[in-house]
Image (spheres, rainbow, N blue to C red):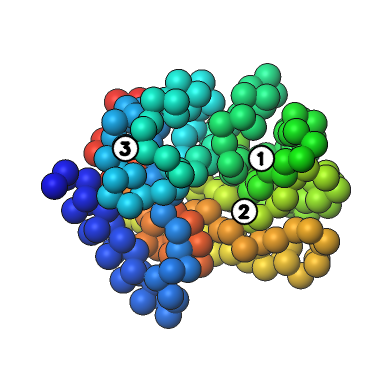
Amino acid sequence: MSHIVSTLATLRETMAEACQRAGRRPESVQLLAVSKTQPAGMVDQAAMAGQRMFGENRVQEAREKIPLVQQTGLHWHLIGPLQRNKVKLAVQWFEMIQSVDSVDLAREIDRRMAPDRIMPILLQVNVGGEVQKSGLAPQALEPALLEIAQLPRLSVQGLMTVPPYEEDPRSTRPYFRQLANLARAMTALSIPGVSMETLSMGMSHDFEVAIEEGATMVRIGSSLFGTRDG
Ligand SMILES: *Cc1c(COP(=O)(O)O)cnc(C)c1O
């Protein structure tokens, strides 16, 4: 039995406990295994242990890795910054793009989709207001959403964030709460075709707090695969 089988089991248990603390059903939170910098063989091992959703932060790395993965039926999400000139490739390899942070980028994704395809997306919000982080400023979310909702080949499914790093994960709570509040505010606008069902927040260091604050998807890399170089 590979190491990852027990690591996954422990992780799912920890997630379920966080759900229980928050009075939520364990099925209400999905695990996105962040496989960046990990070889295809690691993805296969995780897949054999039952993991189905994987996240990559670089298009180039994903297009090299995904064809080498042998397990089938896996779902790939892009979670890293997307440059305009990589959009064409990105829509080929990913089933969801979580890192949409501008109307321009959304337009380009829409333009690159085949006529019969719809790309589910999340809007990335920079809740900490850190200059070095990507994401829409919270006050820019509503106007961007109103425009993006018009694009026929995109389907907005919710919000994503990478909050500032805090030594004590509990200090991250206000940022997670802010994202959940933003999702509620956007839901209240009742924009046709827009869902706020997915709240992608929480990483290895702080996913329990994120779940307590309403995350429906946690993105976990190092706790699952071990620490990485890059
Ligand atoms: C790397 C990464 C993660 C996973 O981080 P870990 O701390 O390794 O769990 C999650 N989200 C994004 C956007 C990332 O780039």
Graded by Cα atoms within 10 Å as few (under 14), some (14 to 19) or many (20 or more), the crowding at tag 3 reads some
Q: Is residue 198 left or right of residue 62?
A: right
Whole-percent x and y of residue 125? 62, 48
Number of the label disc, if any, that sits on residue 100: 1
Place residue 16 in its image quadrant: bottom left
- Residue 227 drawn above or below residue 178: above
The foreground one among 68 and 211 is: 68
Compare marks 1 and 2 and give the one earlier in the sequence: 1
**Residue visible at 66% across and 61% down?**
196
Compare marks 1 and 3 and give the one earlier in the sequence: 3
**Residue visible at 73% across and 62% down?**
186
Whole-percent x and y of residue 44? 31, 37
Q: Is residue 43 left or right of residue 180?
A: left
Q: CA distance from mark 1 to mark 2?
A: 9 Å
Report helix, strand or loop for mark 1: strand
Say whether mark 2 is within 8 Å of ligand 1: no
Which dot, 1 or 3, sits closer to the camera? Answer: 3
Compare marks 3 and 2 and give the one earlier in the sequence: 3
Q: CA distance from mark 1 to mark 3?
A: 28 Å
Graded by Cα atoms within 10 Å as few (under 14), some (14 to 19) or many (20 or more), the crowding at tag 2 reads many
The residue indicated by pointer 3 is 44
Say whether mark 1 is within 8 Å of ligand 1: no
Q: Is residue 184 left or right of residue 131?
A: right
Check disc 2 and give the amino acid type. Answer: Leu
The residue indicated by pointer 2 is 159
